[in-house]
Image (cartoon, rainbow, N blue to C red):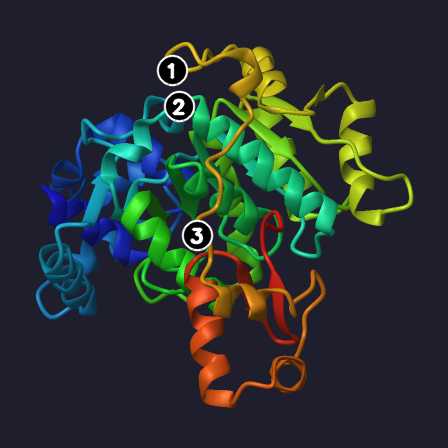
Amino acid sequence: MLSHWLTLYHSRALAPGDWRRLLDRFGTPDAILGASADVLRAAAIAEGTAEAVLDAAAPGNPVREEVEADLEWLEQSPDHHLLTLADEGYPDLLKEIRPAPPVLYLVGQRERLCDRQIAVVGSRKSSPYGRDQAFELSAGLANCGITVTSGLAAGIDACAHRGALRAGGATVAVLGNGVDVVFPRSNRALYGQIREQGLLVSEFARGTPPRAEQFPRRNRIISGLSRGVVVVEGTVRSGSLITARLAMEQNREVLAVPGSVRNPQSRGCHQLLREGAGLAENAGDVLEQTGLAPDGTPAQDSLFRHAPPPVLPDSLQSVLGKITDDPVPIDQLVQRTGLTLSDLSRALLQLEIRGRISRNALGYCRQGPVS
């Protein structure tokens, strides 16, 4: 019963290992909540956990309100979904990881969760080279029928999602916050595109803000859903290297895109390559090393092509021409374009929705290949 899964989840009493131990012992959340405190304690869960679990189901406990709110959210839109470990649509690959998330919040196309997936991840502080590589690689994978999975972060992650979408493929974004929270705000247009053409996933309760300690938990799901992980750029201590390490622990293939020896963001990739990661120069390398075959039989020279970007109206093309790979403040863009702030803002919004630019605290910059 879904409400019992949510009751246990919102009790926040169970450590990751407790879920597996209790489900192995009792079979279902219904049986767990129906057990006595003594029986639960005998299942080797921490002191005080048994009482906290049973209190969560008691009348008047605030947990009941959270459960009801989740069930109401589920009914608000046909693209809202809740998935538990017991559901038929829970991916087999994700069940293999330890600990597997007991509850997933989904927004978008639920069926994408069981697609053949490759993760493409990398640095938020990415170079133009890195962003182009992520875009092209992801577009090539999408053209071969592979769903591209990433973390909706600025930089490489965002370009990976955009590359898959531009090629007309699917993408899965795993979030380090609630599925209803857009972070970073500069990706709000991309969030909307993924909701329409892909899937947003989170194990965190709705409304959960982003916190640093939550992103390694997100990363294990990114790698857990995927047949392989491709790192495009990242320092030796970056989150993308954490994802690669998790992928190795999960027995997934790890690949890296080489970069300039002068770029600090390439050091993590070069470290992975020295340790035996596969070399990823294009989508074909990824398919070969992960054992995935492209859907259909595309010609070899077309494996890595993505659909050409739609032709922009002259007015938008003119504004795009004034924006560079480095962020440009809006007041400078007013001077460069000669437009009023109102007209410029409308043009920038259209470019952002089309995935041609992104916005951060410093201003607006290009996204994806320049056309």
Contact between marks 1 and 2 (CB within 8 A): the answer is yes
Residue 145: mark: 2
Q: Residues within 10 Å of mark 1 (few under 14, many from 20)?
A: few
Label 1 or label 2, whichever comes before in sequence order: 2
Foreground mark, 3 or 1, reads: 1
Residue type, mark 1 in image: Asp
Label 2 or label 3, whichever comes before in sequence order: 2
Of residues 147 and 169, which is closer to you in this image?
169
Residue 99: mark: none
Which residue is painted at 61% across and 80% down in the image? 337
Q: Residues within 10 Å of mark 2 (few under 14, many from 20)?
A: many
Question: Residue 135's x, y, as percent?
Answer: 57, 41
Label 3 or label 1, whichever comes before in sequence order: 3
- Asked if one can make out residue 61 in the rendered structure from this viewpoint, the answer is yes
Q: Quadrant of the N terminus?
A: top left
Q: Residues within 10 Å of mark 3 (few under 14, many from 20)?
A: many
From the viewer's perspective, tell me whether residue 298 is left or right of residue 193.
Answer: right
Of residues 49 and 114, which is closer to you in this image?
114
Q: CA distance from mark 2 to mark 3?
A: 23 Å
Question: Residue 175's x, y, as percent?
Answer: 43, 52
Residue type, mark 3 in image: Leu
Task: Give the residue at the far right of this rendering.
Answer: 262
State whether residue 237 is above or below residue 299.
Answer: below
Of residues 35 and 264, which is closer to you in this image?
264
The residue carrying mark 1 is 295
